[in-house]
């Protein structure tokens, strides 16, 4: 009978250790989920910031082209010609 009691005690100890390990793993899993959510939010914020910076870069590039920087003379001329055509079109519409 004592052999059975020892086996039962051993099983109880092992089951207790398993429950402790399960609780520890569940806590670890929950912490990892929180960390993953934070990382996803950070990525989303950085993605929005990148998009905003790209838009700002394009705006600055256009402004530079309109100001006539040396690097963008061709683009500046094309943009000015495009604006002149638009103005001429508006004037023609108003004249009619």
Image: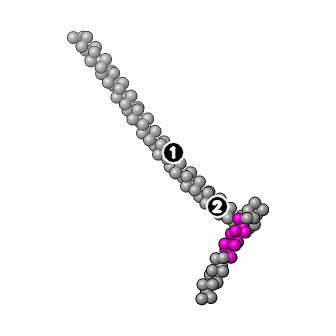
CA gap between label 2 and label 1 equals 28 Å
The residue under the point 28% across, 14% down is 6
**Residue 77: within the magenta?**
yes
Give the answer, above or below, for where 64 lies relative to 35: below
Say which element carries label 2: helix
Q: Position of residue 72 (x, y in %)?
A: 73, 62
Q: Is residue 37 left or right of residue 8?
A: right
Using the rendered image of the protein, determine whether residue 65 is visible from the camera's viewpoint.
Answer: no
Residue 24 appears left or right of 87: left
Name the image quarter holding residue 10.
top left
Nearer to the camera, 75 or 66: 75
- Based on the picture, tell me whether residue 4 belongs to the magenta stretch: no
Q: Residue 82 at x, y = what percent?
A: 66, 72
Residue 61 lies, with reference to residue 82, above or below; the image says above
Q: Which residue is mark 1?
A: 39
Write down the residue under mark 2: 58
Q: Which residues are magenta?
A: 75-84
Q: Measured from the top left, where is residue 54 in percent x and y?
A: 61, 57
Quadrant where the C terminus lies?
A: bottom right
User: Which residue is at the front of the view, 94 or 4?
Assistant: 94
Q: Nearer the viewer, mark 2 or mark 1?
A: 2
Residue lying at the far right in this picture: please name it.
70
Tell me the residue at 59%/58% (across/down): 52
Give the answer, above or below, for where 34 lies relative to 63: above
């Amino acid at each position: 009978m004592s052999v059975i009691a020892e086996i039962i005690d051993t099983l109880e100890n092992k089951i207790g250790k398993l429950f402790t390990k399960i609780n520890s793993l569940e806590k670890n899993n929950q912490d990892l989920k929180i960390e993953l959510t934070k990382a996803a939010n950070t990525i989303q914020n950085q993605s929005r910031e990148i998009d905003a910076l790209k838009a700002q870069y394009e705006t600055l590039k256009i402004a530079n082209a309109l100001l006539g920087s040396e690097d963008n003379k061709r683009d500046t001329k094309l943009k000015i010609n495009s604006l002149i055509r638009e103005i001429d079109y508006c004037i023609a519409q108003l004249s009619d």
